[in-house]
Amino acid sequence: MNKKANKSKKILSNTEILRREEQIIDCYRKHNGKGLRVLFGIYKGDYKNLLVSSLFFVIKQLPVWVIPLITADVINTIIEMPSGATRRLIIDFIIAFIVLVQNIPTHMIHSHFFSKAKRKVEAILRGAMVRKLQQLSIGFHKEMPTGKIQSKVMRDVESVEALSSQIFNVILRVVADMSITLVIIIRKSVPVFFMFLICIPFFAFLMAKFRKPMREKNSEFRKTMENTSSSVIDMLELVPVTRAHALEEKEIKKITNEVTVAAQKGYNLDFVQSLFGSVVWVFMSLAQIVCLFFTGYLAVKGVIKDIGDITLYQTYFTTLLGHVNGIVSVLPILSKGLESVNSIGEILSAGDVENNAGKIKLKKLDGQYEFKNVFFKYDDESPVLNGLDLKVNKGETIALVGESGSGKSTIISLVTGFYNVSKGSLLIDGQNVKDIDLHSYRRFLSVVPQKTILFSGTIKENITYGNPKISKERLNEVIEAAQLTSVIEKLPKGVNTSVGEHGDKLSGGQKQRIAIARAIIRDPEVIIFDEATSALDSVSEAEIQKAIENLTKNRTTFIVAHRLSTIRNADKIAVIRDGKCVEFGNYEELMEKKGEFYNLKSLQS
């Protein structure tokens, strides 16, 4: 029963989500930087909901225009006391009652359709950002701090949602009320109509005058807050290091300085907003006095014949000025919302995307690699790889060794397809990597990084990540192969034990074994170990070496080695220096040669 209820409440199908996400990304690609155009493009597909919502919004606003007319009629009736005055007052009461009460159902219908559109866009925007983040290159993620991305996905989408609400609740109200009110006034008094026309553009001018500085201050404040958010996340991740090196005061000072800068930017924004609000309030009050005396003067001159109409004009004028004041009040929200629309565009319009369209989809992988005169550099930096030549046969285990910065990790990044070669070619099973659909290729890969990445879940969830339907028998086989059995048996909840945030409840060796289990369960053709045992004690290292041996059987394996004693059984060892392979052979061959590898090994002895 509950499942049916939940299903009926679903406002978006998976097909629609995908279509709308692609539509939003395309909209940003075409109109990035044009906030309002992008905003309306985001709602494409929900125009019907917005149209129905707008219709009922206008109907629910009837009291704003009708009640002043009824009030004026009541005053005129009391002053003039015509025949049938009582009947006229009763009719006015009935009309007022109906107009007021209808506001409840029409408001609910308006809210239903608008909320449906708004919540769809909220979900689709976040979904589109997640989709784009998964498509963007590793280089983009290294450049864009996690805190900034988090701020865009959560805070900026909320600001866009607030912008949408304000456009409906304030801008639409202003347009509807102003249009209908001015039509009523021009039919009753042309002089009063022209007075309104003079005042309204004046306030519009005031708004335009303050919009640019507010937008600039909002942009400065938003970027400062993103940087501060990123710094706070870095601080939290570095707490153990900070504490271990007694650097608490330095870290506090750093964050305090950033918070102070953010506070100053916020103060500058608040000052501009306050000045704007204050100036507008004074002019609004003066305008109301002008309206009162002007309509009073027209009444004295006989232009306005019904005294109740003075109340009508004063009410309408106050209402319209109130709407102008409303726009003044929400202008910061509108400015912030449009800035957030542009901020989201920094992700959705980013061009650094891995493009697999039209490329060869791999159905199998033998695991043969050949680097042919490969050069690589990061952006405008000096080359990291300088004419690398290296061949790895199917099923071979090859260890990459060398000093820090020699290019070992860069080779791994090219093997995983995170970066493209700058010059030369990398062949995988004889195919140029540039011609291969990397998504299909990576299905045959497993990577065990130096820093194990675990999410806040159970051991089982972390091992079966991406493969949730693995059988219990297969899971137990993997746990045994990864040397995890003894660890899990000691835990009260076994594989259902929570690992804590980023695996903080586990030791380095335990986390590494979970990472190896995650790699084994994928049953890959190619395994990559990026200094997987560099930070472990000798006992943990020995256990993990057994797990690695279980994992690498009959598979092409790349090992970036920090401890050279761990690669004795590698089929081949490539010594990397200055982006080139300067020595190549097995352990015994390189030790007998007494060259670069021998010297590196001697330094660790």
Image (cartoon, rainbow, N blue to C red):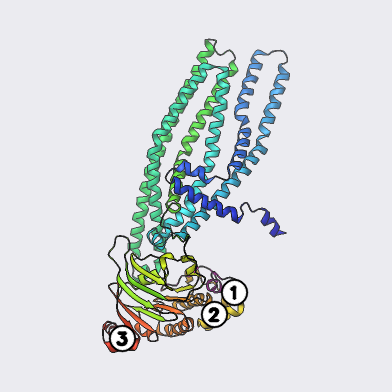
Q: Nearer the viewer, residue 73 or 187?
A: 187
Residue 555's place in the image compared with 291, above or below, is: below
Q: Which residue is mark 3?
A: 590
Question: Disc 3 to disc 2, how far (Cα)?
Answer: 34 Å
* 86, 316: nearer the viewer: 316
Check residue 342 in the rendering and tell me which mark sits there, or answer none: none
The mark nearer the N terminus, 3 or 2, is: 2
Q: Which residue is mark 2?
A: 478
**Mark 3, secondary structure of its residue:** helix
- Magenta residues: mostly which secondary structure? loop
Residue drawn at x 72%, y 23% as measured from the top left? 90
Secondary structure, mark 2, is helix
Pointer 2 local density, CA inside 10 Å: few below 14, some 14–19, many at least 20: many
Q: Under tag 1, what secondary structure? A: loop
Across and down, in percent, residue 242 comes to 36, 67
Residue 470: which numbered mark, if any?
1
Q: Is residue 272 visible?
A: yes
Residue at image coords 46%, 63%:
359
Q: Is residue 558 above or below residue 13?
A: below
**Mark 1 touches mark 2? (CB < 8 Å):** yes
How crowded pointer 3 is (Cα within 10 Å; few <14, some 14-19, many 20+) is rated as some
Residue at left offset 42%, top offset 81%:
396
| Residue 356 x/y as whole percent | 46, 61
Magenta stretch? 450-467
Under mark 2, the amino acid is Val
User: Which of the image's four quarters has the C terminus?
Assistant: bottom left
Where residue 504 sits in the image (x, y, percent)? 47, 71
Residue type (three-letter) at the residue carrying disc 1: Ile
Instruction: State the separation of the CA atoms marked 1 and 2.
Output: 10 Å
- Mark positioned earlier in the residue sequence (1 or 3): 1
